[in-house]
Amino acid sequence: MRALLISLALWGVTCLVLAVGLGWGKPAQVVGMFVVSGLAVGSLYALGGLGLVVLFRATGVLNLAAGAIGMSGVMIAWQLVEWGIPAPLSWIAGILFSSALATGYGRSIAPRMAWREPVVKAVASLGFALILLGLASFLWSDDPRKFELPTDKAAVMILGLRVTVTRLLVVLIALAAVVLISVALQRTRLGLQMRALANDRRLAALIGVPVVRVETMAWALSGVLFGFAGLMFGDLVRLQPAVITFLVVPCIAAAIAGRLQSLPDVLIGGLAMGVIESLLTLSDMFKSIRPVAPFVIAALVLIAMNRGRRLTFAGED
């Protein structure tokens, strides 16, 4: 808990300093709008990072296809709406499609590389992402399209700022996801089995942990998180396959901020990265480095928090 509070304080101070420094001389409401926008996008980074961490801890796979899986789900949802399917059913279908894609990969391709190096596993998932992106480019043209939710038109006033219900819901859902997944990992049998796999896969198999079932559940859960993040990203940012596919980049940075272990740290890191990235837009000098900001931040976090320690992506390998 002490480490978490320190992490929260450091991220909070960093965001506050940037908000004051980059927003100096600008109206407070303008700066506040950028902070709110950053929190919403940062929540999506955090949700994707949660999916990556849960999956990595259970299977040892760093899934670089997370963004492409979310992209596929939102494109399916958009297409179903265009065909006249009721919107709520289309959204659910999109998330389930993302989960099915993740589970299908996890059961058909990932087991064939169970004993390969982590880099090989990650590169294989990147190949899967490129396949999905290629299929999406073939099926859908580059014409501008828009994905909307009913909550986009509703808003609440917070500290004098008009915040859409969509942005508020994304932040609340990210917070709820961290709490529910953390409780599940600590209090349920499946969570115990996932933690056993994370500690020692061979020993877990020897003591009777159903490895295949646990891994399947981890792939399915990560797919749901990727699908929801893709759905929200298509609404809040841009409904474009390539843009959503590369959402995985800041999600990986958020996962690294949590050292691929701590879910609360992933949430805090993801939110902070979204806010910092948004605040950089206020500066003509720094707005051009926005795309690389999450990785620069993650690298600084690793240097600060892991001095004398070694971060690996190898699990038990």
Image (spheres, grey):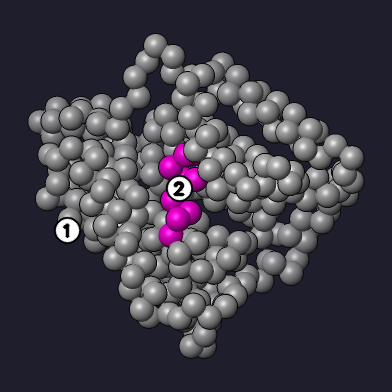
User: In this orientation, does residue 175 appear?
Assistant: no
Residue 108: which numbered mark, if any? Answer: 1
For the point 80% across and 33% down, the residue is: 20
Above or below: residue 217 compared with residue 237: above
Task: Determine whether the residue tagged by mark 1 lies in a helix, strand or loop.
Answer: helix
Point out the stretch of residues depicted in magenta.
Answer: 245-254
- Residue 264 appears at what percent x and percent y? 52, 33
Q: How far apart are marks 1 and 2 (CA)?
A: 25 Å
In front of the other: 100 or 251: 251
Task: Determine whether the residue tagged by mark 2 lies in a helix, strand or loop.
Answer: helix
Q: What residue type is labelled 2?
A: Val
In front of the other: 46 or 192: 46
- Quarter of the image with the C terminus is top left
Residue 180 appears left or right of 203: right
For the point 56% across and 16% down, the residue is: 2
What residue does disc 2 label?
A: 249
